[in-house]
């Protein structure tokens, strides 16, 4: 990520040159083959062979029933943003794919810095049936540039046996405030010796989840930093410290340690994006012992909900492609149009859709043995439809990291108001330079 930020210093200047070169290319980009039956190859960049790559291969099979002449050349690219920036800055569009997967919280940054590198999906793909929270992340200057994919809806994934050991039930944790969560966490800690949940030290995930659940973010509607003047951020940092001090939350040093706490029973559960299910379910000996409830909400915050999101990505069509019509048709017919497709990818990969019609599928309605027969996929689709929309902004990562540093320093004894003011100034400086 540090390399990406260093490279982005020259992006604004480079994008001016890039845009000029792209004007002529974009006029030619959508010509494609005149024969609708001529062979077409769409190059796709994504990552994770067991999740995104797998899903795209299944999407190809579905689409080939409609257009047998279309095939995908799928590349598993690990450092996708770094490689993309290198190509865009150098205007090496020949090396770029037709379709690319990008993280939700970086789409706006790339479209803003390289406005002619992508084609808007408006009028080409029907994205109206995706969860509203996913539509907001790809919306830039009145156009939408992303076709949503995976569901980042959060939940409290909880060990049923542990809370029952504490004399409580799973339902006690559903649709509650963070204040009540701490009360219950103290009871569980006292009776079982376990923290309710864990995170990597630093608080970034927790701050993001709690903040989004209120419908606010690190920036105002004009895209200006809203950190120092945002009382909700102050409340969330104080809440994080209370969770740690009360030993309801266990901080761990790294990701592997975090996953280990879930698999070895160190903690009762985790509050995370639903993609964490794959890591939880690795512990097959715990089948039937897990459950899922809604994310806690902040008290005394008007509009705060028990719904949030963490993570997620979307498919984008690059403007240099000579097969734009085919690329958009593929995304429209499969990713925004096929219940069968989402039924196919769910069981083997845990890829939970944000395309709401998939929620009516019998596959999504099936009880999950690992979660005690709970219909978690159906529930998660419902959660996704209720997540507040926020606008990430092009300095989303920088703001997130600045606030997380403020939280860490506060935990170490620094003055919170000073740290929040420093975070505000840091983001303002980055945006002005």
Image (cartoon, rainbow, N blue to C red):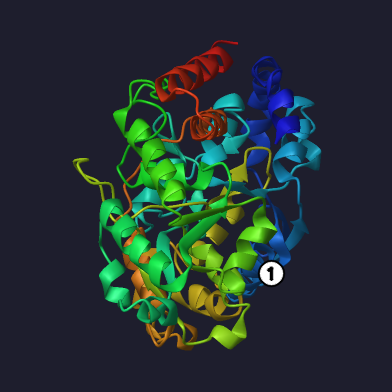
**Nearer to the camera, 425 or 363:** 425
What residue does disc 1 label? 50
Residue 226: image quadrant is top left
**Nearer to the camera, 20 or 260:** 260
> Is residue 79 placed above or below 230 in the rendered structure?
below
Residue 186: image quadrant is bottom left
**Nearer to the camera, 353 or 244:** 244
Q: Residue at 75% across / 45% down in the picture? A: 79
Q: Residue at 68% across / 45% down in the picture? A: 322
User: Would you say 285 lies left or right of 333 here?
Assistant: right
* Quadrant in the picture for the N terminus: top right
Percent x, y of residue 57: 67, 69
Q: Residues within 10 Å of mark 1 (few under 14, many from 20)?
A: few
Instruction: Check disc 1 and report its element: helix, strand or loop.
Output: helix
Percent x, y of residue 279: 60, 70
Q: Residue at 35% across / 59% down in the picture? A: 295
User: Would you say 376 lies left or right of 409 here?
Assistant: left
Q: Residue at 81% across / 41% down in the picture? A: 95
User: Is residue 277 among what the camera can see?
Assistant: yes
* Quadrant in the picture for the C terminus: top right
User: Would you say 59 lies left or right of 419 here?
Assistant: right
Percent x, y of residue 172: 26, 71
Outermost residue on the front side: it is 190
């Amino acid at each position: 990520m540090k390399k990406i930020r260093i490279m982005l210093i020259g992006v604004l200047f480079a994008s001016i040159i890039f845009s000029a070169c792209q004007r002529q290319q974009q006029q030619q980009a959508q010509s494609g083959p005149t024969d609708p039956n001529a062979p077409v190859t769409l190059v796709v960049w994504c990552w994770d062979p067991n999740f995104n790559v797998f899903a795209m291969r299944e999407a190809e099979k579905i689409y080939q029933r409609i257009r047998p002449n279309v095939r995908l050349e799928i590349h598993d690219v690990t450092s996708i943003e770094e490689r993309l920036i290198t190509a865009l800055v150098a205007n090496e569009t020949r090396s770029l794919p037709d379709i690319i997967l990008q993280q939700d919280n970086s789409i706006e940054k790339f479209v803003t810095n390289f406005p002619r590198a992508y084609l808007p999906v408006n009028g080409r793909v029907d994205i109206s049936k995706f969860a509203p929270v996913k539509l907001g992340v790809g919306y830039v200057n009145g156009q939408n540039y992303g076709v949503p994919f995976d569901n980042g809806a959060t939940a409290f994934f909880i060990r049923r046996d542990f809370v029952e050991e504490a004399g409580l039930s799973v339902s006690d944790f559903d649709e509650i405030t963070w204040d009540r969560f701490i009360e219950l966490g103290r009871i569980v800690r006292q009776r079982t010796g376990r923290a309710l949940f864990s995170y990597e030290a630093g608080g970034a995930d927790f701050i993001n989840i709690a903040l989004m659940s209120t419908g606010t973010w690190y920036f105002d509607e004009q895209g200006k930093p809203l950190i120092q003047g945002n009382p909700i951020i102050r409340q969330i940092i104080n809440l994080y410290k209370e969770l740690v001090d009360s030993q309801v939350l266990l901080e761990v040093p790294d990701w592997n340690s975090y996953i280990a706490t879930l698999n070895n029973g160190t903690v009762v559960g985790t509050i995370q994006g639903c993609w964490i299910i794959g890591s939880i379910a690795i512990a097959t000996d715990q089948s039937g012992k897990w459950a899922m409830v809604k994310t806690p909400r902040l008290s005394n915050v008007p509009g705060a909900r028990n719904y949030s999101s963490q993570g997620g990505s979307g498919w984008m069509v690059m403007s240099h492609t000579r097969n734009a019509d085919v690329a958009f048709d593929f995304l429209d017919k499969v990713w925004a149009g096929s219940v069968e497709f989402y039924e196919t990818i769910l069981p083997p990969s845990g890829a939970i859709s944000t395309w709401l019609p998939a929620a009516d599928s019998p596959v999504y309605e099936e009880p999950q043995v690992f979660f005690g027969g709970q219909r978690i996929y159906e529930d998660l689709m419902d959660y996704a439809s209720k997540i507040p929309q926020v606008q990430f902004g092009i300095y989303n990562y920088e703001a997130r990291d600045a606030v997380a540093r403020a939280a860490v320093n506060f935990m170490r004894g620094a003055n919170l108001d000073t740290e929040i003011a420093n975070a505000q100034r840091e983001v303002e400086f980055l945006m002005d330079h």
